[in-house]
Image: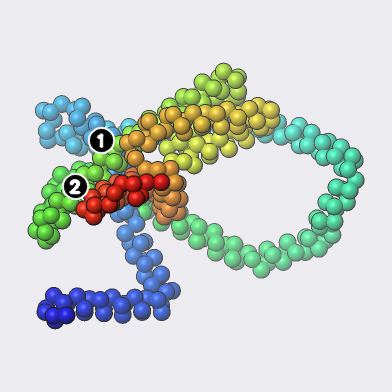
Amino acid sequence: MQLDKKTIRTLLLMAGFCIVLYWALQNLDRVSGILGGLWGLVSPFVLGGSLAFILNVPMRAIEKKLPKRMTRFRRAAALTLTLLAVVGVLALVLLLIIPQLGRTIASIGARLPAFWAESQKWLAEIMERYPVLEEWISSKFITDWESAIAAAVDWFKNGGFALVGNAATAATGVVRGFVNFFIGLIFAMYLLVCKETLTRQAKMLLYAWTPAEKADKAVEVARLTNRTFSKFLSGQCLEACILGGLFAVGMLLCRMPYVTLVSVLVAVTALIPVFGAFIGCVVGAFLILVQNPMQAVWFVVLFLCIQQIEGNLIYPRVVGNSVGLPGIWVLMAVTVGGSAMGVVGMLVMIPACSVAYSLLRTATRRKLRQKGVDREKYQP
């Protein structure tokens, strides 16, 4: 091996990397704390960038509709209208859900005594019919109430301070979450207002400090990412509206209660990929269960039927074709994104994985062509 300057620099970098990796493996707790602190610093800006990507889709459409003579105030007007539209949609959803939810809670409260009496009567009949079951339940549950009360008092004495500490920690986390969201929103607004300037500056840095081929590839990836995100968000919103409409029509035909509440709830939760609609199903089934248990069963059957139609016909055409990501990777992206950043992570991770999947597929096919590998060798 010829020890020129490039080789020596490479060897020094590899040695430094090995030393750092060894130290990190020996001090995992410290490394975890450092990474957690760094994530706490950058998480508002990551959230702001994600919000900017999401808000840029409707903002770009609104900006195109504005008159061109508003050159000076066009961007500010588009951003203002976008924020007002988002707030308006959220307010409309809350106005539809909250009154109906209040009436639902009142109805549930009125029906609970009768429901509880019927449940007790049903349990008494079961116990009378199956004495063995009553003996098994009696042997499994605590019958010494004095010992149970004493244990509860001891728990409150010993765990009271821990409970207060956990409540304070939770309150601090909520405040920190609001602060991070506010900082992220301000950062997102700045990105949206100055996106052309920031894009030009990023390209200048890219072409100044990297080879032209790598810079062209980075710009191509950025354009693919932007295009994929836009198509995904537009398709996801359209798919949620279609799913909510299908539920409204199906529940009206089946004469089920809480049509407005459940259909709007399903449409809103369907914005969360894969798992969202199931949240609306669980809530809707619970609400209908208190009023009519049999209708709750039919509601679940209706949900499964509509979910099959939506999953096999609507979603692949509206969202799947635009994203181009297989179902197993969609599930993985939703799981990882939800664990890292919650709902925003779910929305961001699917297009990000789609971009990575598209780039890997293109590079793999190019590599196979360069090596002259026959197609028959990798066909199933």
Residue found at x 46% / y 32%: 312
Element marked by disc 1: helix
Which labelled disc corresponds to residue 28? none
Of the 4 image quadrants, the one containing the N terminus is bottom left
Q: Check the image and report above or below for 2 versus 300.
A: below
Q: Nearer the viewer, mark 1 or mark 2?
A: 2
Q: Quadrant of residue 52?
A: top left
Decide if residue 86 is in sight here. Answer: no
Crowding at dot 1, Cα within 10 Å, few <14 / some 14-19 / many 20+, comes out as: many
Q: Check the image and report above or below for 242 versus 196.
A: above
For the residue marked with disc 2, what is the amino acid?
Glu
For the residue marked with disc 1, what is the amino acid?
Met
Q: Check the image and report above or below for 359 versus 258.
A: below
Q: Left or right of 191: which side holds 147?
A: right
Q: Residue furthest top?
A: 253
Q: Left or right of 56: which side holds 102?
A: right
Residue found at x 31% / y 78%: 18
Q: Position of residue 360 (x, y in %)?
A: 29, 51
Q: Quadrant of residue 6?
A: bottom left
Residue named by callout 2: 220
Q: Left or right of 29: which side holds 56?
A: left
Colouring convention used in this rendered image of the protein? rainbow
Residue named by callout 1: 59
Q: Position of residue 154 (x, y in %)?
A: 72, 66
Element marked by disc 2: helix
Residue found at x 38% / y 30%: 317
Query: Of 68 and 205, which appears nearest the observer?
Result: 205
Q: CA distance from mark 1 to mark 2?
A: 23 Å
Residue found at x 27% / y 52%: 373
Decide if residue 25 is in sight here. Answer: yes
Q: Position of residue 270 (x, y in %)?
A: 45, 36
Q: Earlier in the sequence, mark 1 or mark 2?
A: 1
